[in-house]
Amino acid sequence: MDEISTLTLLEVSDLTTLLKKRLGLPAGMGMMPPMGGGMMMPGMGMAVAAGGGAAAVEEKKPEKTSFDVKLEKYEAASKIKIIKEVRAFTALGLKEAKDLVEKAPTLLKQGVSKEEAEQIIEKLKAIGGTVIME
């Protein structure tokens, strides 16, 4: 059931075609009746509600895979440590990193994996920065 609920519309269409052939149904016959009724499929042992499965697939948002790391603020005493850490993970020069940190709140890094974003956040929080992942 979990595999079926994650199918794309194209995959659902292919599955419908294959089921019609296997069950010996005419090509013009629809698998799901209109108006929210259900249809029993031989061998499946379960009713499929019209629109119910399709709506669940459409509403499910894809899991986010890239994140942005944003420096909200930092402790004044930690400014130099923050700049050094920003240089380490952005490959910016000293002046560019300093300018970036001083513009807080500012976006430090875009499109990173969740693990990398969490590592950056941990390091910056440990030295006095307030950092969020978007």
Image (cartoon, grey):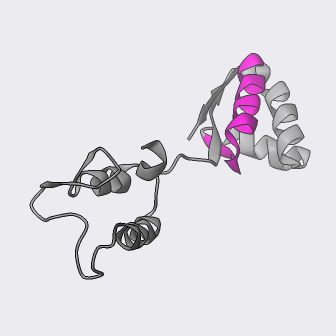
Could you say which is closer to the camera, residue 123 or residue 84? 123
Verify whether residue 116 appears in magenta: yes
Horizontal and vertical percent position of residue 55: 28, 54
Placement of 21 over or under 77, stated as above or below: below
Q: Residue at x 75, y 26 (%)?
A: 124
Examine the rendering and report whether any part of residue 73 can be seen.
yes
Q: Residue at x 56, y 41 (%)?
A: 134
Could you say which is closer to the camera, residue 8 or residue 4? 4
**Which range of residues does the magenta coloring cover?**
106-128
Q: Taking 71 as reference, is 8 left or right?
A: left
Q: Residue at x 30, y 52 (%)?
A: 53
Examine the rendering and report whether any part of residue 61 can be seen.
no
Count of marks overlaid on the render:
0
Horizontal and vertical percent position of residue 52: 24, 51
Horizontal and vertical percent position of residue 40: 22, 53
Residue found at the very far left of the displayed protein: 35
Horizontal and vertical percent position of residue 45: 30, 44
Placement of 56 over or under 72, stated as above or below: below
Corner quadrant of residue 106: top right
Placement of 25 over or under 69, stated as above or below: below
Q: Taking 53 as reference, is 122 left or right?
A: right
Verify whether residue 51 appears in magenta: no
